[in-house]
Amino acid sequence: MHRLLIPALALSMLAGCASGPDDIRNRPLGPNPSAFIAAEIGFARLAQDKGQWTAFRETAAPEAVMFVPQRVMARDWLKSQKDPAEAVKWQPHAVYVSCDGNAGATTGAWQKGSANGYFTTVWLRDPKKGKLSWILDHGDGLTSAREAPEFIASKQAVCGSRPAVPIEAGGEGEDMAVGLSPDQTLSWTSIVRADQSRRVTIRLWDGKAMAVVIDDQVAAPKQP
């Protein structure tokens, strides 16, 4: 999960062009990477305005998952969570988007007090309403903060030929799940191992193969 369980804006042009977080998340999209950045910024702003877990609840897709560190259905887990007095802050550093613009992955940095870390969020667009909701969210702490880039990086999947869907299987004792954008040009694989370490990998179609663009590996929690 995002930026948090440890103990768990930029882009003023994007932030300023919308009247509020709901407008950002609900506006119609094309295959536009900036829409996912705007959604992430709106998500972060909502956490500051209304509370950390309130923001997670209001932006989660019905089937969204997070890691605590085991995989949980986000809406079920969030029901019992109270907003902390200080919400975590975060900023997107990069975005990767499917060819058709219906799915995207954002990644960046978070801060809470003296703690720093990174996050990755996978977003899906509602095909009827155009609303963006997150479907996977995770992150971890870092000993040194990620340096903010001068510009937020963006990359879109190559359009044209449709990639074959790879067949993956988890190892013994692993909780593995694979998600695909509707056009199959963006995929996300999450694995939680028996020791509660995990790996989240985002792949983007480059015209020849599903290339890895994000590969987050989280160590097993330290035992008390």
Image (spheres, rainbow, N blue to C red):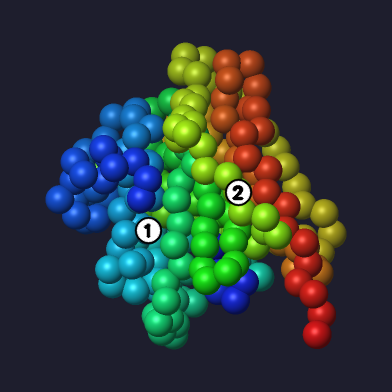
Q: Looking at the picture, how far across and down is residue 124, in whole percent?
A: 40, 46
The C terminus - image quarter: bottom right
Give the camera-side residue of 206 and 150: 150
Badge 1: residue crowd in 10 Å (few <14, some 14–19, many ≥20): many
Q: Residue at x 65, y 62 (%)?
A: 141
Q: Residue at x 49, y 27 (%)?
A: 155
Above or below, comparing residue 143 to residue 195 in the picture? above
Which of the labelled discs sits on residue 91, or is there none? none
As drawn, is 178 to the left or to the right of 169? left
The N terminus - image quarter: bottom right
The amino acid type, in three-letter code, at marker 2 is Arg
State the residue lying farthest toward the right: 172
Q: Residue at x 19, y 41 (%)?
A: 17
Residue bearing the label numbered 1:
44
From this viewpoint, is residue 184 visible? no
Under circle 2, the secondary element is loop
Which of disc 1 and disc 2 is earlier in sequence? 1
Which of the labelled discs sits on residue 146, or is there none? 2
Badge 2: residue crowd in 10 Å (few <14, some 14–19, many ≥20): some
From this viewpoint, is residue 46 visible? yes
Under circle 1, the secondary element is helix
Give the camera-side residue of 108 and 28: 108
* Mark 2 to mark 1 CA distance (whole Å): 17 Å
Which dot, 2 or 1, sits closer to the camera?
A: 2
Q: Looking at the picture, how far across and down is residue 222, in whole percent?
A: 80, 75
Q: Looking at the picture, how far across and down is residue 13, in whole percent?
A: 26, 38
The image quadrant of residue 208 is top right
Q: How many marks?
A: 2
